[in-house]
Image (cartoon, rainbow, N blue to C red):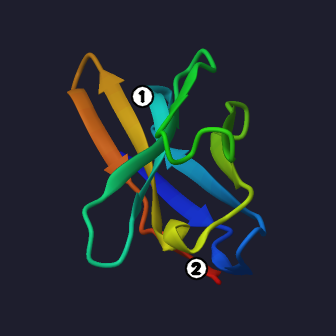
Amino acid sequence: QVQLVESGGGLVQAGGSLRLSCAASGDTACISTMGWYRQPPGKERELVARINSGGGADYADSAKGRFSISRDSAKNTVYLQMNSLKPEDTAVYYCNAGLFSRRSGSGSSWGQGTQGTVSS
């Protein structure tokens, strides 16, 4: 079992920045990829960015050039630095961890979500 706790959401004006953090606890040795997803009001959840255990990252087109994902493996924490925010970035942001163990196979864990609101 892996538990994820997000923090860092809030209200910011357009053009501003937010930094989200996600701390993992529990059986963290099973974690492979960590990532951030978001769910805008009335829309489906979508990938924002993810990073693997080697530090390789990929981003949604909407996040490229503005957002940066990083990972501190010693702290079992993943960060999302969001700059040049736009009102359309308003969403609940969820942390996700991809899991793998020989005993349980593949799995996934989600955080509870943190609200990010960008005002125009």
How far separated are the C-alphas under marks 1 and 2? 32 Å
Helix, strand or loop for disc 1: helix
Give how far across and how far down residue 15 sits, in percent.
76, 68
Q: In which quarter of the image is residue 53?
A: top right
Q: Mark 1 points at which residue?
A: 30
Left or right: 97 as drawn, with respect to 90: left
Q: Where is residue 50 in the image (x, y as percent from the top left)?
A: 50, 35
Q: Position of residue 113 (x, y in %)?
A: 45, 68
Q: What residue lies at 77% left-to-right and 64% top-to-bottom?
A: 17
The reply, left or right, for residue 104 in relation to residue 74 is left
Residue 105 lies in quadrant: top left
Residue closer to the observer: 96 or 120: 120
Q: Residue at x 42, y 68 (%)?
A: 112
> Which quadrant of the figure has residue 39?
bottom left
* Above or below, comparing residue 31 to residue 75 in the picture: above
Q: What residue type is labelled 2?
A: Thr
Residue at (52, 23) in percent of width and height? 52
Q: Nearer the viewer, residue 77 or 57?
A: 57
Sequence order check, earlier mark of 1 and 2: 1
Q: Nearer the viewer, residue 77 or 66?
A: 66
Q: Which residue lies furthest to the right in this view?
A: 16
| Residue 100 numbered tag | none
Return the mark for residue 117.
2
Q: Which of 110 and 10 is in front in this view?
A: 10
Tell me the quadrant of the picture where the C terminus can be found: bottom right
Residue 48 percent location from the top left of the image? 47, 47
Residue drawn at the location 68% of the way across and 47% of the way down: 66
- Quick one: quadrant of the N terminus? top left
